[in-house]
Image: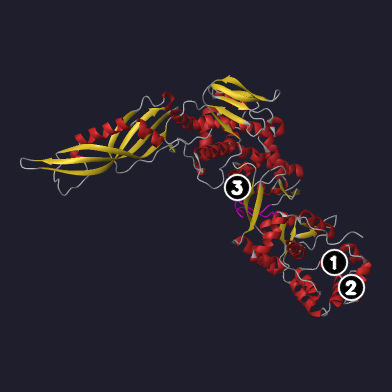
Amino acid sequence: MALGRSFKEYVANRFYNELSAAVSDFIERNTDGLDVSSASVRHIDSAELSDITVKQVYVDDLPDMRIAFDVLVEAEFEIAETDRHNDRYDEKSQWFKISCTGDLACSLNNFAITNIEVYNYRNKSANPMSDSLVPVITKEKLEQVAKEFLEKYYREALYEPMAIDPAVLVGRMGLSMQMRHITSDFSVFGQIFFKGCEAEYYDKKNDKCETVSVPDGTIFVDPDAYFLRNFGSVNNTIVHECVHWAQHRKAFELERLYNENATQLRCQVVGGFRGNEAKSATDWMEWQANSLTPRIQMPYTQAKVKAAALIQEYKRRFGTYDTIDVMEAVIDEMALFFGVSRISAKIRMIDLGYEEAMGTFTYIDGQYVKPHAFKKGALQKNQTFSVSAQDAIIESTINAQLHTAVQSGNYIFVDSHFCINNPKYIETDSSGKPALTAYARRHADECCLAFDLSVKKTTNDYGKQFYTECVLYRDATSDIVFEAHFDSSKLNADVDGRAKMVSAYNKELAEILQKLPGSFSGTIKGLMEWKGVTVEALAEASLVSAKTIQRLRNDENYETTLETVIALCIGLQLPPAVSMDLLGKSKFSLKYTEQHIMYRFLLDAYYTHPIYDCNQLLAEQNFAPLTADE
């Protein structure tokens, strides 16, 4: 059930007579207080109301189910001046503020007007609510609202680190919980019944829907959540529904004022808004429940106390001084201790100020990306240093700034990062592949280019805002597909400036290019001498046969293929400028087809990888390998 009724419209329709009578009485008793001027009526002897229009209603949240609200109305009335000789009339309008109270528990049957005055200004509400009676909670107020929730229902969690027991919380709130299969496809795994009713659930054993009588405040939790998700996600679901009960019963009661058959709210519990359209009342409620739940499960102060203790403990265990070295272990320990999911623990660690958590538990292209750290404040929450190969290919092709930077040879794409091509940051691992050095992983902001991330696709629209607002979390099982775009901010400008300072190698390249002969075959010979590579070694590194290499060295007119030339560039690990020189002396050129864009990426940013890695990347993009293993 989606909520989103208008309280203003309800008040205007149901209480029109009461509001109208109050305004009429006021203007009849306070003709001197009416702030109107008239060319025909110099002194108001009487005023008579014609009509009112409700312009706005401002609601203040009170304890239990009570509310206070100011109704702003525009009144149209007739003023008159009478004397012995002539009566004069004029039609005027004025705004009034009518202060009211009511209790939604009795359907506002105790509606009362407490004050009426000419509208000049209105005081700011202490606890404002939207027109749909959803509490107005800003990001800045989330911690305070979570604290108030705990003070009311789980006070001890504010004084020492502990896990919130969902069963205890449910009991203290006067709610009840049942394990029920909610849907056949497991699309909904949490449900709160604001009003007792005959509730429908899915009988998994008999593969059909059944009904059961449930009282007010019943929570359904799908038992499959324990098996298909994890224990932390189940706890999250239960607390999430408790938040709905505490924060959103008034929005539900407003729905019941319109529709007395309304009973329940179903949740997927992943948070956020649907796309970019205007946010509905249900959208706001889901955002609030998803934002408040981890703050309730991991209260700010006590979570920080626990995190600090765990960081010190694991640093001692691992014999390290770097927080990034222990962050993954700390996140998992936080998740276990507080009974939450890994993603919740990771996001909460970032909330607590541990930005090292942003570089942990990331999976890209089906591969685990090693943890990396950066200077505090270097990245926004929607930014990353880690991008997929596909995004790297596309951005280095269509973004002129990145294209120029990569073609300069100052960067290579390694471990899902565009990193400065320098031994300080790039090393060769035990399998002969390029990898980020330990220093580079601890100083990503110094050597890696940053990208803005946005959600490209997800099977669950509610998830978008949660992942983009909290943190762009990319795990191995996520159904969310991200899209990276090169960020031309000062951070990348600083990295690029540092890359350009690595100029000694570029100077060497310029000298090499000047010395190379003008022929294709002669250039192959010259490059093999420069690299100190034998025909046999190049054959192994490029998967081009030794016989073919010999013929290319000795016969300028020997027929070959573009793929063979590119394979030789990869085998020689030629920087972009040098590979472009060799390619330019052949009869081939790269065009802007999808396949040639892939080849350009290999030559610009992937050339330090073994030929096997290059062929694998081509296969992942549905292209044939450059050469076969002969």
Give the x, y percent position of residue 169.
Answer: 58, 26
* Upstream in sequence: badge 3 or badge 1: 3
Secondary element at image label 3: helix
Cα separation, mark 1 vs mark 2, equals 10 Å
Looking at marks 1 and 2 on the same chain, the residue that comes earlier in the sequence is marked by: 2
- The residue that label 1 is drawn on is 564
Place of residue 319 in the rendered image (x, y in percent of width and height, measured from the top left): 76, 46
Crowd rating for badge 3 (residues with CA inside 10 Å; few <14, some 14–19, many 20+)? some
* Residue 534 visible, this orientation: no
Provide the secondary structure element on which disc 2 rests.
helix
Residue at the extreme front: 208
Height in image: 49 above or below 169?
below
Range covered by the magenta-colored residues: 373-387
Tag 3 and tag 2, C-beta contact below 8 Å: no
Q: Nearer the viewer, residue 491 or 54?
A: 54
The residue under label 1 is which amino acid type? Thr
Residue 168 % position (x, y): 60, 24
Horizontal side of residue 36 vs 208, given as left or right: left
- Report the side of 404 relative to 142 (left or right): right
Helix, strand or loop at mark 1 = helix
Distance in Å between CA atoms under marks 3 and 1: 43 Å
**Residue labelled with disc 3:** 468
User: Which residue does the image show at 30% across and 33% down from the upper left?
Assistant: 19
- Badge 1: residue crowd in 10 Å (few <14, some 14–19, many ≥20): some
Closer to the chain start, of discs 3 and 2, is 3
Camera-side mark, 3 or 2: 2
Residue 451's image quarter?
Answer: bottom right
Task: Indicate yes or no whether the magenta region holds residue 120.
Answer: no
Label 2 near label 1: C-beta < 8 Å?
yes
Q: Which residue is mark 2?
A: 552
